[in-house]
Amino acid sequence: MSQITFKNKQTGKSVTLDFNLKILKSAGREVFIQDSAVYSLLHRLFTLQATLLSYSDIGCIVKDQKSSFHMEDSPDSIIANKYVFKARTVLKNVMIEDFIMTVRGLGYKVSPKWLFFVEEQVDEESKNAFIEEITAIIEDCITYSESADITQDKSGLSFIKPDQDVVMRHFRRMNDCYHAFLSRYSSPGNSIELFELREKITKVLLYALYWRVGDSLTDDKFRSDYKNELKLILRQINQAVALLS
């Protein structure tokens, strides 16, 4: 297994450690773990699951990765505290703050809030979450279009001038869910499918920003076409996602 994922049973957040790339990933964010001792510590936590890592365990991990003179005179508890702090900082960079639990006087372990997720479950859940969010965005776009004023310029073109807060909210939601999905499925075997998916997502983005233009349409016809075209794109996205391995 090239990566291990944990999911928080309370919040639904997930965090993945990629062993090949030494990258920590969560919610579309990822960070390369440069410090070999921090990576080794996180690797042990991810692979040990709920097992306690004692101060001496962490001290050995750090000393194995660092020179023999690194904090040579420091007790294991001090070394452990320092490197767990560094590991927690890396986790915070991907918006995870409660993964490592302190066992006072003994060491550290993965918080019981976080449950190990097998690869197949993560794949399916990632796909479902992506589809659910894109579907929700499309439904919100359609709902907004049904009450928004349709503007017609002198040339007869029809379009919506949306509220800027609405546009930015749609953009942020699409950006977050797409990049989370893209980072999860980026691999040589998925290249063609991901390019096709990106094309569909780009179309949704244009509609979400209300850049769709109609030619000499009534307001009702514009809204109807806007809705039907988005529904078609959503079906195409579902088909593209289903092809991903």
Image: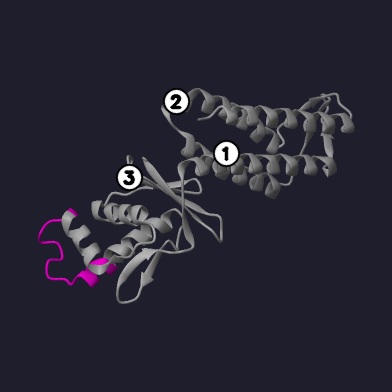
At label 3, the amino acid type is Lys
**As rendered, which of 233 and 98 lies closer to the eye?**
98
According to the picture, the residue beneath numbered tag 1 turns out to be: 127
Mark closer to the chain start, 2 or 3: 3
Is 77 a magenta residue? yes
- The residue at the point 89 percent across, 33 percent down is 220
Q: Position of residue 221 (x, y in %)?
A: 87, 29
Q: Which mark is residue 189?
A: 2
Q: Earlier in the sequence, mark 1 or mark 3?
A: 3
Left or right: 193 in relation to 58: right
Q: Please tell me whether mark 3 sits on a helix, a strand or a loop.
A: loop
> Residue 105: x and y, percent?
30, 77
Q: Residue at point 10% right, 61% down?
A: 69
Residue pictured at 37% horizontal, 60% vertical = 89
Give the number of marks: 3
Q: CA distance from mark 1 to mark 2?
A: 17 Å
